[in-house]
Image (tube, grey):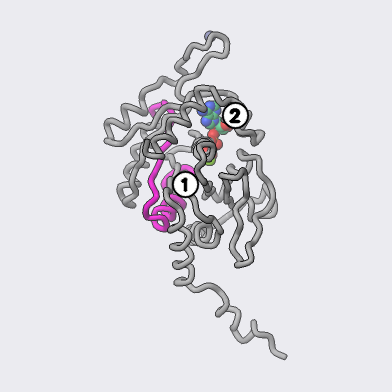
Amino acid sequence: MESCQSKGCASKQEKTQSDQDVAVKGSLAKIKNKFIVMSGKGGVGKTSVSVNLAMALAKKGFKVGLMDVDIHGPDVPRMLGIQGMMGLSPNQKLIPMNYSENLCAVSIESLSASRDDAIIWRGPIKHSVIRQFIGEVEWGNLDYLIIDSPPGTGDEPLSVAQVISDAKAIIVTTPQEVALGDVRKSINFCKVVKMEVFGLVENMSGFFCPHCGKEVELFGTGGGERTAQAMGINFLGRIPFDPKVVSCGDSGTSFQEKYADSPVSKAFSAITERMAGR
Ligand SMILES: Nc1ncnc2c1ncn2[C@@H]1O[C@H](COP(=O)(O)OP(=O)(O)OP(=O)(O)O)[C@@H](O)[C@H]1O
Ligand SMILES: [Mg+2]
Ligand SMILES: [Zn+2]
């Protein structure tokens, strides 16, 4: 007997573009607020900010999804300390990885067999992956979806802007002037793709001396606030430099649970208050 495949039946079983559109719309309708964390420059703390904002919102009782669209360097699972593969629901949708009752996450890493696989994908494939991360994932009802992106204004943030038209941008920078120059690029990108800029976060801003508790300015501070003012966008706050952020990120430990009263945890909590419109 001739198999169905050879007659081309298989292609009919594949989801058509319009089926996918319906799935994407259906998922998005159940998510109240969408934020993409971005920056012009690498290593300024996008993933740390994404993870910590997601944790701070979850701690306040919101249902939060964290979507890692950094396809080449997915860091979210490592920082959350979660491993394993995403499962499939009975209706063939991907089930996000559970971090806690209120927080789940989706990353390309949870789809690829090995952590060290280098993933080489072109723009159009990235676009379809991002659509699938929305339409073919069982996100359920969420108060917040936080999207962590790779540095720059490339395919990933562009796809997010196209697929999630009501996503708002949180731009991360460090106090150094070079990083601030990149902020302008990110803001201009948002203008071009018509994405609302929610505001600017200055990360690694100042350092509290562990010996005397006094604040030391590492790279200068206040540049973020001045740039936000000059560009007419909201300044969301400063997050101090704290070496414990690095060790928690590396070991997949929740900084905010371990150091709830630290200036870093308070800074994240204050930003989530603004995200909640308070
Ligand atoms: N406030 C902070 N205090 C101390 N270290 C920090 C802080 N924020 C981030 N880091 C550290 O800086 C490094 C880079 O952070 P992270 O990976 O979050 O940046 P990123 O912008 O996502 O990088 P990439 O562009 O590679 O995706 C990490 O080692 C992280 O632990
Ligand atoms: Mg990152
Ligand atoms: Zn000191």
What residue type is disc 2 on? Val
Q: Is residue 184 visible?
A: yes
Q: Residue 262, percent across and down?
A: 53, 22
Type of residue at label 1? Answer: Tyr
| Residue 273 pos. (x, y %) | 42, 34
Secondary structure type for disc 1: strand
In reply to whether residue 157 is colored magenta, the answer given is: yes
**Residue at the spot 54% in from the left edge and 8% down from the top edge:** 212
Residue at (60, 79) in percent of width and height:
10
- Residue 88 shown left or right of residue 27 in the figure: right
Q: Relative to residue 25, is residue 212 drawn left or right?
A: right
Q: Nearer the viewer, residue 2 or 212?
A: 212
Q: Which residues are magenta?
A: 149-177
Q: How many callouts does the rendering have?
A: 2
Residue 122 visible at all: no
Residue 126 highlighted magenta (yes or no) = no
In this rendered view, identify the residue nearer to me: 101 or 202.
101
Q: Is residue 180 above or below residue 69?
A: above
Residue under numbered circle 2: 246
State whether residue 127 is above or below residue 241.
Answer: below
Q: Is residue 22 above or below residue 33?
A: below
> What residue is pinned by disc 1?
144
Quadrant into which the C terminus falls:
top left
Query: Can you tell me whether the CB of the residue at mark 2 lies under 8 Å from the nearest atom of ligand 1?
Result: yes
* Sequence-first disc among 1 and 2: 1
- In the image as oriented, which residue stretches furthest toward the bottom? 1
Q: Residue at x 43, y 62 (%)?
A: 25
Ligand 1, by image quadrant, is top right
